[in-house]
Image: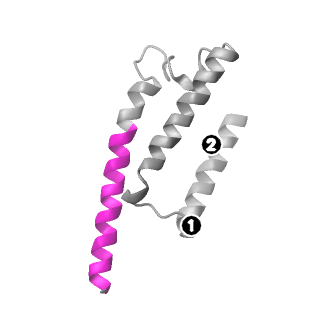
Amino acid sequence: ISGLLHHSLSATLAIALLLFNQIDITYKKWYCTLIGFSFYITVGAFMMSVFNMSEAYHIVEPLLSDTPLTAWVMAPMYAVGYGIILGVIEFFKNKKEKLYS
């Protein structure tokens, strides 16, 4: 239940930040995703080595049993999806700027 609560709160806060224009999604800040992924892997590796948690953040263990969906498989898929979303957002931002200028 706490995991569901945590993710629901995170999603609600993310949507609220987007709606109130507190987040500026742009290609100029794409590197922040790489920094976030590096922290994700670092904390997961720490938990696996120090606390002996083999399933920490599903870095090595699959997200769904009997599938190859580990963090190393999902990361490239996420990067491609993120790039597409950024491209669509930039396209509409540029279109809006040209329309109003």
Residue at 67% in and 13% down: 52
Q: Measured along the vertical axis of the image, is residue 1 above or below residue 22?
A: above
Residue at 32% in and 42% down: 80
Look at discs 1 and 2 and give the one toward the viewer.
1
Q: Measured along the vertical axis of the image, is residue 43 above or below residue 85?
A: above
Residue 7's tag is 2
Q: Splitting the image into 4 quarters, where does residue 76 fall? A: top left
Binning the other alpha carbons within 10 Å of mark 2 as few (below 14), some (14 to 19) or many (20 upward) gives few
User: Along the line of sight, which residue is nearer the eye, 32 or 92?
Assistant: 32
Q: Which residues are magenta?
A: 78-100
**Principal secondary structure, stretch drawn in magenta:** helix
Q: Amino acid at mark 2?
A: His
Residue 5's tag is none
Residue 1 left/right relative to 48: right
**Residue at the farthest bottom position:** 101
Question: Which callout, 1 or 2, points at the residue further toward the start of the chain?
Answer: 2
**Alpha carbon distance from label 1 to label 2:** 20 Å
- The residue labelled by disc 1 is 22
Residue 9 left/right relative to 99: right
Binning the other alpha carbons within 10 Å of mark 1 as few (below 14), some (14 to 19) or many (20 upward) gives few
Residue at 62% in and 42% down: 7
Quarter the N terminus occupies:
top right
Element class at badge 1: loop
Element class at badge 2: helix
- Inspect the magenta stretch and tell me whether residue 84 lies in it: yes
User: Along the line of sight, which residue is nearer the eye, 57 or 35?
Assistant: 35
Q: Measured along the vertical axis of the image, is residue 82 above or below residue 87?
A: above
Q: Amino acid at mark 1?
A: Gln
